[in-house]
Image (cartoon, helix red, strand yellow):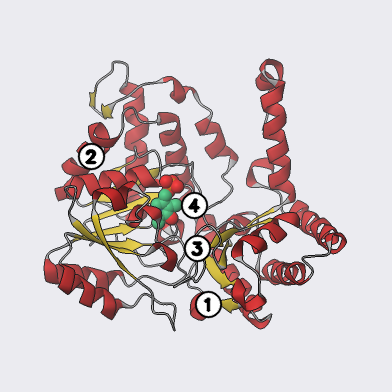
């Protein structure tokens, strides 16, 4: 990027930004919720749309001068509807958690019962964890994955739903590597008249590309972040059927939020256009192939991968199989320039701050052009650094190899 004005005004801030640029260019990003956006997305975010207040919706704003802003919001909505096949979309949610807060507000009253996937089984904080607003305001009952297979146990979900009769069933995850049986969720919800809510924050890009199943046409409501596999700016959106449009819009504004971030809306529009291309489809396909290659190699090297593989962009690895904790593994890998996140495993014997696993994602590196061959190499580096974790010299040498590979695959924004 060109920073000639920042350089004059605030060299201190610029120095930090450039340090982070260098870190991103020389290290490997394997946090499953991250990605690298294009220069076009970055430019839209840096635009004068930042200067405008636009509470309300196109044609119904609470501030003057929004004729042009209306155009950008409508463009983002139109493109989102096209790539997901949605009837209605709200592109204003500031991020995934506020989007989910708005979804609950639209469909539920505080105290209502909701079914969601348990955090240590791959769910998200906003799916009913007790330290999160969702668990404080609503009466969440949590379903789990089958301990042996690592797959969501749909018969258990059905049993729990029939017994508890929740008003809403949430399907979605942050650390689960299998296709979701959306149809079965819908069938179960229909038996008890519950609302269906899909949170596709992680796999939205894979769904938009058509390489994973899409719940949008028959679920009541679907939320997603725009910055994970979808590869847009940090933000979120909510899609729903027309019949729910009014209550969803009202929950986002004035229910949950004030003014939307229209420079981010513009960047969302750009990323939706990018997601509607052959290039993006190829990226989505390759992301899954890469996760599968990584998983196979890790299994070969003696690691326990939860559910023994993956259908999407991520794997969860049980580090108990190598006698170290997820946090220790995270630190060792940080030392060689590979970022991953510690993760709970199903029925984790250890606490969430020091869980047993790590979650590894392939979307970001696939964006940089890496393929199966690089994934195998990375698995080998992960294994040998774990095996030599007490040997700083050894780790330093691997870090150099990581940096060399990293430089061969520049960020999309530095090409
Ligand atoms: C990442 C994520 C969110 C939250 O997104 P933030 O933008 O971090 O608030 C919500 N739900 C799921 C399933 C996620 O993975």
Respond yes or no on whether mark 4 lies under 8 Å from ligand 1: yes
**Which quadrant of the structure image shows residue 283?**
bottom right
Mark sitting earlier along the chain (2/1):
2
In the picture provided, is 406 more to the left or to the right than 369?
right
Return the disc, 4 or 1, that comes first in the chain's sequence: 4
Residue at 60% over, 68% down: 290
Q: Position of residue 204 (x, y in %)?
A: 42, 56
User: How far from the left and from the top, in percent, is residue 92?
Assistant: 34, 37
Q: Which of the numbered marks, if any, corresponds to residue 251?
A: 2
Label 3: few (<14), some or many (≥20) within 10 Å?
Answer: few
Query: What residue does disc 4 label?
Result: 228
Question: Pointer 1: what residue?
Answer: 309
Q: Count all numbered tags in the image, as a single digit.
A: 4
CB-based contact (under 8 Å), mark 2 and mark 3: no
Give the secondary structure at mark 4. loop
In the displayed structure, 86 sits above or below 361; it is above
């Amino acid at each position: 990027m060109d920073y000639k004005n920042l350089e004059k005004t605030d060299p201190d801030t610029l120095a930090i930004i450039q340090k982070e640029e260098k870190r991103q260019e020389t290290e490997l990003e394997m946090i499953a919720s991250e990605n690298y956006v294009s220069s076009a997305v970055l430019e839209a975010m840096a635009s004068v749309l930042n200067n405008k207040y636009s509470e309300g919706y196109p044609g119904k704003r609470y501030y003057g001068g929004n004729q042009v802003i209306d155009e950008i919001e409508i463009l983002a909505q139109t493109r989102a509807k096209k790539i997901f096949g949605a009837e209605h979309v709200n592109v204003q949610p500031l991020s995934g958690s506020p989007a989910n807060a708005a979804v609950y507000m639209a469909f539920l009253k505080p105290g209502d019962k909701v079914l969601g996937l348990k955090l240590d089984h791959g769910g998200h904080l906003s799916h009913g964890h007790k330290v999160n607003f969702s668990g404080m305001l609503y009466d969440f009952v949590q379903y789990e994955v089958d301990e042996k297979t690592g797959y969501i146990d749909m018969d258990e979900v059905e049993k729990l739903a029939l017994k508890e009769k929740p008003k809403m069933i949430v399907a979605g995850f942050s650390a689960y590597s299998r296709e979701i049986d959306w149809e079965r969720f819908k069938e179960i919800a229909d038996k008890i008249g519950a609302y269906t809510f899909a949170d596709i924050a992680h796999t939205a890009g894979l769904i938009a590309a058509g390489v994973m199943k899409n719940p949008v046409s028959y679920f009541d409501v679907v939320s997603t972040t725009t910055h994970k596999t979808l590869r847009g700016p940090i933000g979120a959106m909510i899609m729903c059927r027309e019949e729910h449009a009014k209550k969803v819009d009202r929950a986002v504004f004035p229910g949950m939020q004030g003014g939307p971030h229209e420079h981010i809306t513009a960047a969302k529009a750009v990323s939706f256009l990018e997601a509607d291309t052959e290039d993006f489809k190829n990226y989505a396909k390759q992301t899954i192939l890469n996760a599968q290659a990584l998983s196979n190699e890790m299994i070969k090297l003696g690691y326990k991968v939860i559910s023994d593989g993956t259908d999407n962009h991520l794997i969860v690895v049980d580090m108990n199989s190598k006698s170290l904790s997820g946090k220790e593994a995270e630190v060792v890998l940080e030392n060689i320039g590979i970022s991953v996140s510690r993760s709970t495993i199903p029925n984790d014997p250890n606490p969430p701050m020091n869980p047993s696993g790590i979650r590894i994602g392939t979307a970001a590196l696939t964006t940089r052009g890496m393929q199966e061959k690089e994934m195998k190499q990375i698995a080998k580096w992960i294994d040998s650094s774990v095996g030599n974790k007490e040997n700083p010299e050894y780790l330093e040498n691997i870090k150099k190899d990581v940096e060399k590979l990293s430089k061969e695959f520049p960020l999309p924004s530095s090409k």
